[in-house]
Image: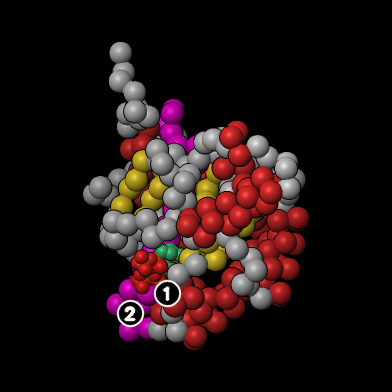
Amino acid sequence: MKLNPKAPAPQAPIGGPRHVAIIMDGNGRWATQRGRPRLFGHHSGAKRVREIVEACPDTGVEYLTIFAFSTENWKRTQVEVAGLMSLFRRYISKETRSLSEFGVRVRFIGDRVRLDDKLTKLMNDLEAATAHNTRVHLTIALNYGGRDEVARATQRLAMDVASGQLDPLKVDEETLPRYLDTYVLPDPDLVIRTSGEARISNFLLWQSAYAEYEFIDTLWPDFTKEEFHTLCAAYGGRDRRFGAVKT
Ligand code: IPE
Ligand code: IPE
Ligand code: MG
């Protein structure tokens, strides 16, 4: 959809999205356009997160899930991957206090096994430090891939079947999501991808079955709370039928 950055921020719509998920894309191109290294774009992108988190209560958004690093992003250069890991460590250390003061509960989804010990400790500590908060539920997808998540869930489910704790004939649509990383979260209502790419790149495959999608041209480091408000307001006007016919 076309966005008018000068338009006043609309009010929180009734029936707006409760859970918004964002594929934060375009950091590299943003930096390249400025003749800077890609990591400069990642640092600028990380700074945008707080503004969007703080915009959630006004917009009626209770759950915000952001895609920070995919299971496929290990294919990037060693310099970029190491720079991103260092950025995540610094971001968590730096933001813990302000996130907590704002009432944000932080969770991480994705496979932590491949992440270094220092980073996983910071992630665990941030989850523990914010576990009592309820104002905004921020979920950060780090080393996350939708297929990887379903595979890991299936592995755990199969183990429960093998140990006799789960009857395979009782496995249904309600059973599998209990094994997903997102088991405590509602499904996303709205998925936003910045940077003009119209694909989901392995993000929340199971959970987004009935999500609304917005693919916008803005590069992530330029994304503002006004755009966020506009997209949430547009969602309020959508007719979600979930396969049924309205009578
Ligand atoms: C998104 O920005 C951030 C990550 C994937 C870590 P990109 O780094 O993918 O930016 P572009 O797509 O190359 O511009
Ligand atoms: C998706 O962006 C992953 C994140 C935003 C973390 P990518 O830039 O990795 O996706 P592709 O490669 O364009 O599909
Ligand atoms: Mg990209």
Residue 60, position in %: x, y? Answer: 51, 36
**Tag 1 near tag 2, CB within 8 Å:** yes
Q: Please state which of residues 174 and 118 is positioned toward the viewer in this rendering.
A: 174
List the residue tagged with mark 1: 41
Residue 49 in view (yes/no): no
Q: Residues within 10 Å of mark 2 (few under 14, many from 20)?
A: some
Residue 108, position in %: x, y? Answer: 62, 57
Q: Amino acid at mark 2?
A: Thr
Residue 224 in view (yes/no): yes
Q: Earlier in the sequence, mark 1 or mark 2?
A: 2
Quadrant the C terminus occupies: top left
Q: Residue at x 54, y 56 (%)?
A: 151
Q: Which residues are magenta?
A: 13-36
List the residue tagged with mark 2: 32
Residue 225, position in %: x, y? Answer: 43, 51
The stretch drawn in magenta includes residue 228: no
Respond yes or no on whether mark 2 lies under 8 Å from ligand 1. yes
The stretch drawn in magenta includes residue 34: yes
Respond yes or no on whether mark 1 lies under 8 Å from ligand 1. yes
Residue 1 shown left or right of residue 160 in the figure: left
